[in-house]
Image (cartoon, rainbow, N blue to C red):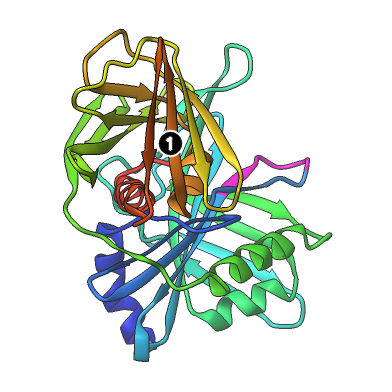
Amino acid sequence: MKKILLSFMAAFALSCAAGFAQGPVKYNYIKNGYTYTGTELRRFSNGKDLPIDMRLTRVDLGSKGDVYVLRAFFEDSAPSKIPVGCTWVFHTRGKGLVSLKNSYNSPNLVAPNGLGAGSSKTWWNCGEYYLEENDVLRIMEGIMRMDVMKRFSESGRVTYRFNTDDDSFAKLLGEMYHAVKDAPKPRVTIGSNLNSIQDRGGNRLVDTKKLGIGGDNGISLAYLYYAPSNSESYDMNIFLPGSTVPFNSVITVKLTDGSTIKLRQEKEMVPGHVLCYPTAEQLRRMARGVERISISTTGQEVLLTFPDGKFASAVDQLYNELQTVAIL
């Protein structure tokens, strides 16, 4: 298994961050024959040490077993490029030490940064650590302390040190482990539907190609990352040739589970084009199933129905592909 783990690390770096699933799972997709399932970012904070935002990804290699990837953003008051090979050591309760090595080797080794409270600057320094399932299970049984090496200096190693006597870290990792382990089989296979990627000053804008949702109608999505606030958002474009939807018109999305999502037209009177700003959670809900969309306009209502599930399928596909290049 060690050989499989080492040979897989480079391939994972190229497909990191993508997908869709329910609950605490953010993505769940197939790429190059492997299944990738990852959680939302979860925050560990013991109230004393600097917080960690982290995500656990399970990679199902089929007959070769599973590999787990823990990506962590260590909050700090200064940037720190964590070198490849720096360790994250867990002092477990009765199971010895679990020692992981950072493999994050992006050209920008300092992860996303933004403004913290007041006028202070907050940095999120990134590390990525590969685990076998047995490593995850040992940590889940409880740890007393963990030490994260963030850099080398002339005087020795500089580390983050966390005391975790209440086992809060082990509990959080356990929640993420069960979320990815118990996730349903993915519906999406990653394709080539990204249109462009633009990076400026730490910000990122990515838009997708248009996918058909029936007749001449279609949708596309866009992803935006804002470095100053370390946040992200999404645009959804609905293309309806022959219809003009006024600014601020209500878009009601009726889901197959009976619930509804209400959005608004954010674009000024452009024939055939609706622009709205759904949240990531709303996109994931739409990806589970959309029954119909009604758009209220002056003097008329545009009604779109999807008995074939094309709208949900298109959202699922495009949202997943955006996650492959998402920052958070």
Q: Which residue is mark 1?
A: 293
x and y percentages locating residue 245 in the rendered image:
33, 16
Which image quadrant: the C terminus?
A: top left
Report crowding for label 1: few under 14, some 14 to 19, many 20 or more residues within 10 A (C-alpha): some
x and y percentages locating residue 21 in the rendered image:
49, 58
Which residue is rendered at x = 67% and y = 64% of the image? 175
Classify residue 182 as left or right of residue 228: right
In the rendered view, tell whether residue 328 sits above or below residue 59.
above
Which residue is rendered at x = 30% and y = 65% of the image? 12
x and y percentages locating residue 148 in the rendered image:
56, 55
Give, as a single range, the part of the protein colored magenta.
47-53
Residue 155 seen: no
Classify residue 39 as left or right of residue 11: right
In the rendered view, tell whether residue 310 sits above or below residue 91.
above
**Which residue occupies the extreme right position in the image?**
166
Majority secondary structure of magenta residues: loop
Per the image, is 303 magenta?
no
Residue 30 falls in which quadrant of the image? Answer: bottom left
Q: Amino acid at mark 1?
A: Ile
In the rendered view, tell whether residue 276 sits above or below residue 4.
above
Per the image, is 51 magenta?
yes
Task: Count the labels in the image.
Answer: 1
Which image quadrant: the N terminus?
A: bottom left
Residue 295 seen: yes
Q: Relative to the observer, which residue lies in front, 134 or 99?
A: 134
Which residue is rendered at x = 45% and y = 48% of the image? 290
x and y percentages locating residue 152 in the rendered image:
44, 50
Disc 1, SS: strand
Classify residue 259 as left or right of residue 112: right
**Which residue occupies the extreme bottom position in the image?**
63
Residue 9 falls in which quadrant of the image? Answer: bottom left
